[in-house]
Amino acid sequence: MTLVSSPSIADVRKRLAGSLVLPGDPGWDDARQAWNLAVDQRPELVVLPTTAEDVVETVAFARAHALRVAVQGTGHGAAARGDLSGTVLVNMRELRGAELDPVARVARVAAGALWEDVVPLAAEHGLAALHGSSRDVGVVGYTLGGGVGWLARRYGLAANSVVAVELVTPDGRALRADADQNADLFWAIRGGGGNFGVVTSLEFRLYPVGSLEAGWLVWPWERSQEVLEAWAAWAESMPDDVTSVGRILQLPPIPEIPEALRGRQLVVVEAAILGDSREAAALLRPLRDLEPEMDTFTTIKASELSALHQDPYGPTPGIGEGGLMESFPPSAVAALAHVAGPGSGSPLLSVEVRHLGGALDRIPSGAGALTHLDGRFLFYAVGVPVTAELGDAVARHAAATKEALAPWGHGREYLNFAESPIDTRTAFDADVHRRLCLIRAQVDPDGLIRANHPIPAASTPAL
């Protein structure tokens, strides 16, 4: 039952170009659904805006009726947000669109844009965005949380390629934030997540990448410890032009998976290499000396890179845990293999370790709140809860994986890989978090915005 009266609902519906959906309305379950089907979102109502003006109306409506506002692009990271009672869910899926200036190498996207809206458009001009590992991830949520993709070791976090943001603040103002105007807000948004307003559009830099070398090397999972030890040492010797992932996979026997991999347990190295085939062959030689049973490396177009990781396309249930690590030595590899490899009884679909460093370890000029990632490796463990019983097992094993790798971490979280509620102080240096809290107090002292990882408002206003 909604907390808002019928006349108020009817009034705001007249003013919206988009739609407002209530419990019991046709399309309610579709409107409230997150991409992650393991999350059962039950807000008071859902608004699907089609214009920035719709967002202004929605924020004003929420404030007038003592409701909070949660924003969702796709709902990949919806698990951490929790109960949405007393909340308007703003589902951005109808506010899509992308355009670019190939001369300036800048793209502009609407709030609901997916990477599949941007990547092919940029590729027509020999350009690439700093997208992630899946083409149906929302651009805005991914970017505001940091954004670590296949070009990250060369070009850094996606958040620090943002050049401007348009948003509606919690007091209902539509404004633009960039290096010259609303600079504090511009700083906070880039890495501080969706805590400071409702983003309606984003502008970010593109990079000259026409083609590259990329692919998988695949071994039976019985070789998990051997291969991951070799990969971790190899990765740390690589130039910034190489971004790679070591991964343990248990693939289900479903038609969507290539026949050669279907229903198998594997250890995999994936990599993207900014170079030609001769350079790539020289770099890959130590891993090829391990005699993988499959080697898919080839020259690909930049537009094909978002399919390299083979993430599932479309809404899928998942339970996962992730975190940063200072290092990934043989002892850490052994701990991971023990909890997620052969003989572990793990039900996890994928446990991946991403190599960081390079540009991710440097602070660029004019960076936002998340300047870099404080770790050399980033892990993520995930499984599919097909049944409630399996969901419990997945959750236990994901948590056990995080615990097993904790000795090589330092308690630092990365917001985009945190699927459970966290203390956001673990995602930032102390001074940075303090400044974020001050800015939150200035723009949203009443806590209207409900982010999946909330930055608390400080008791004193920002300067």
Image (spheres, grey):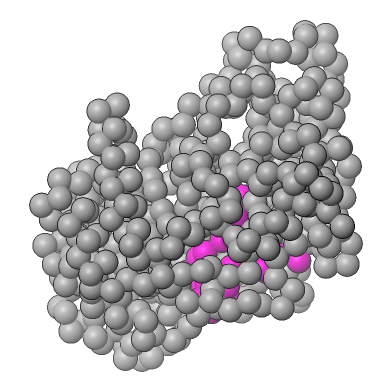
Q: Can you give x and y, in whole percent of width and height, for residue 100 in the image?
A: 73, 64
Q: Which residues are magenta?
A: 139-163
Q: Is residue 309 magenta?
A: no
**Would you say 227 lies left or right of 144 here?**
left
Query: Residue shown at 63%/69% (left/top)?
Result: 371
Foreground residue among 74 and 232? 232
Q: Compared to 216, does 260 lie above or below? A: above
Q: Compared to 169, does 293 lie above or below? A: below
Number of numbered tags placed on the structure image: 0
Q: Can you give x and y, in whole percent of width and height, for residue 290 in the image?
A: 16, 79
Q: Can you give x and y, in whole percent of width and height, for residue 69 in the image?
A: 71, 32
Q: Compared to 212, does 262 lie above or below? A: above
Query: Residue shown at 52%/64% (left/top)?
Result: 148
**Farthest-out residue, front:** 459
Quarter placement of the N terminus: top right
Q: Give the quarter of the image for residue 18.
A: top right
Q: Is residue 157 magenta?
A: yes
Quarter placement of the C terminus: bottom right
